[in-house]
């Protein structure tokens, strides 16, 4: 990921926040994922319209004592893993809201 990338949540998941963490289940294979506090901030900021770089600069770097470059590198690794498991959709252009709808469980 070298240019601006926009992220949206897959429609084939169920997610629930539990304190500072988020649990996500893939509807395609019932795999369960746990996101830590920082990954939860990224997950919560994914809207299809905000580039990953802006999420890192405006959310991660302002809430945590971390340099932008290091935070972006870590965020890219996370995003690549979530995309690889089908939990996130990535595009070089903003993604419509229909693609980013997610089933949130209460």
Image: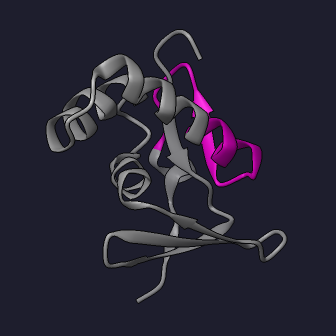
Across and down, in percent, residue 91 comes to: 59, 27
Residue range of the region highlighted in magenta in the rendering: 79-96
Across and down, in percent, residue 80 comes to: 65, 36
Q: Is residue 41 magenta?
A: no
Quadrant of the image for the C terminus?
Answer: bottom left
Q: Nearer the viewer, residue 76 or 44?
A: 76
Q: Quadrant of the rendered structure where residue 66 is? A: top left
Q: Quadrant of the rendered structure where residue 36 is? A: bottom left
State left or right for residue 44 relative to residue 81.
Answer: left
Across and down, in percent, residue 63 comes to: 17, 44
Which residue occupies the extreme bottom position in the image? 106
Q: Quadrant of the rendered structure where residue 60 is? A: top left
Across and down, in percent, residue 103 comes to: 53, 74
Q: How is the image coloured?
A: one colour
Is residue 44 depicted above or below 63 in this figure?
Answer: below
Residue located at (44% from left, 39% from top): 48
Q: Is residue 85 magenta?
A: yes
Quadrant of the image for the N terminus?
Answer: top right
Is residue 89 depicted above or below 76 in this figure?
Answer: below
Count of numbered labels shown in the rendering:
0
Is residue 96 depicted above or below 12 in this figure?
Answer: above
Residue located at (37% from left, 34% from top): 49
Report if residue 6 is visible in the image. Answer: no
Is residue 103 depicted above or below 76 in this figure?
Answer: below
Which residue occupies the extreme left position in the image? 62
State left or right for residue 54 relative to residue 30.
Answer: left
């Amino acid at each position: 990921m070298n240019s601006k990338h926009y992220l949206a949540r897959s429609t084939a998941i169920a997610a629930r926040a539990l304190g500072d963490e988020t649990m996500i289940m893939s509807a395609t294979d019932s795999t369960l994922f746990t996101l830590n506090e920082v990954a939860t901030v990224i997950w919560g900021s994914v809207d299809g319209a905000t580039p990953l770089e802006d999420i890192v600069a405006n959310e991660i770097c302002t809430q945590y004592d971390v340099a932008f470059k290091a935070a972006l590198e870590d965020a890219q690794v996370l995003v690549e893993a979530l995309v690889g498991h089908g939990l996130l959709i990535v595009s070089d252009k903003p993604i419509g809201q229909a693609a980013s709808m997610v089933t949130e469980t209460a």
